[in-house]
Amino acid sequence: MSAAPAPRSSAAFRAVLRREFAGYFRTPLAYVFLAVFNAFAVSLAFFVGGLYEAGVASLDRFFLYHPWLWAFLAPAAGARLWAEERRQGTIELLLTWPVTVWQAALGKFLAAWLFLACALLITLPVAFTVGWLGDPDAGVIAAGYVGSLLCAGGCLGVAAVASALTRSQVIAFVTGFLGCFALVLVGYGVFDELLSGALSSGAVDEVRRLGLWRNLEPFTLGLLDARPAAYFLSVAFAGLGLSAVIIERR
Amino acid sequence: MPLIEAKNLRKAYGPIVAVRDVSFAVDRGEVVGFLGPNGAGKSTTMKLLTGHLRPDAGAAAVAGRDVTEDPVAAKRNLGYSPEGAPAYGEMTVREFLRFAADLRGLDDAAERVRATLDLCRLGEVAGQSIDTLSKGYRMRVGFAQAVIHDPEVLILDEPTDGLDPNQKHEVRRILKDMAARKAVIVSTHILEEVAELCTRVIVIARGEIRCDEPREKFLARGADLNAVFRHLTA
């Protein structure tokens, strides 16, 4: 054997990304997750949203429930990011290997986001069904999928912070869910009424801009708007950055 | 230049000072036995040397690289097995070692994995998930990930804990074979390990170094090493 080789900064990141992504499929939990996501996404769209009865070749009723789905399922997928490393003690191993906290955090985060993208991908038959039943605008549907994926990233950012704070996946999940739940509630009428008692109408409007649905809605209408995209990416990468800082200062 | 250097390391957890003003250096070819009672500061010192913890004061360097200022370069030359040999339990032994090799950017990762499986005699469990292994095998997996890149510096926190006498002998044999090319620190509670494996002994108690001397001098302190240990750590 020879001495340690020269650095290749991307090797560590890629290794973490590959391990984490494959890690989701090493246990049956991933398949349960994918099945649950698919079942809920389709059921909510058809049975609650009345996608079929509406008689419109559009997926807006399908995407309407995605903030709720991601608020629940992104923390479920993201709970393991750091909490599991802490529980198993492998965080000591990982962070004494030649990888920076930021490389590890980014690799883990992107792997989880990729996993959520897989969950979203298996709902494509819904889009094909709508295409078969009517003549939907493919661009609008594609924009909806882009928006949903960005929304998932935002929820994952919240989940990453929750996971960095504890060694218990259950606590990470509950904390992450509560954080995402708050972002779902923002923008709903009932929540606005509660806020309007304490804040000015201008402030309530500003708070409303932080809601998940408020930012997802333009995508479901076919608008690839920079502002909501920047919102989701800001939440995602702020969460990623904060989780890395928490781990670095552990 | 020493391969491991600790300069006035200090680390406190709240009001409890775990390590205070610890300094030593380890050269190539040395195997240092790190002895001390539970809670003496051995593991904390190792965590400071490996960059897992940041010192409140002082500095640590591995192969001439400061572990706080230049952590990735320092860790590239470091093999570390933490206490209890934690590992990703859902991975197989082969997958885990391949991950360790890939993360370190080893070009000949597949060959390194094969050689390390042979070296640590893990071939027969290579396809088994780590969760299903006995403690002895798990410890060997922890050792294997620490040596897969043939580092200049090895830091092993109780590497023979829980092993049966044959397995202990095997780990010590591998370490002895490697020792001439490396600087090694081994923390242990097993005093016989000092005589069999180490070239030098550092005894730590209440966060302070109580003794730092060559093995022969340590062994000459008395025939009853347990009594020597009790006296030094009192």
Image (spheres, coloured by chain):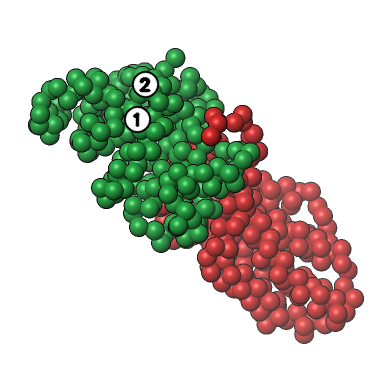
Residue B110 in sight here: yes
Image point (20%, 29%), residue name: B205
* Residue B176 place in picture, x, y as percent: 36, 33
State the residue position of label 1: B185
Give the farthest residue toward the bottom.
A53
Q: Is residue B138 left or right of residue B203?
A: right
Residue B57 lies, with reference to residue B146, above or below; the image says: above
Residue type at tag 2: Val
Q: What secondary structure is found at the residue carrying circle 2? A: strand
**Where does label 2 land, which residue?**
B26
In the image, is B139 to the left or to the right of B164?
right
Going 62% across and 69% down the picture, which residue do you hit? A34
The label shown at residue B118 is none
Quick check: A183 above or below A165? below
How crowded pointer 2 is (Cα within 10 Å; few <14, some 14-19, many 20+) is rated as: many
Residue drawn at (37%, 48%) of the image: B139
Q: Earlier in the sequence, mark 2 or mark 1?
A: 2
Q: Secondary structure at mark 1?
A: strand
Chain B palette colour: green
Residue A117's spot in the image, x, y percent?
69, 60
The image position of residue B155, as x and y in percent, is 38, 33
Q: Are marks 2 and 1 in contact (CB under 8 Å)?
A: yes
The hue in which chain A appears in the rendered picture of the protein: red
Q: Nearer the viewer, residue A158 or B126?
A: B126
- Amino acid identity at mark 1: Ile
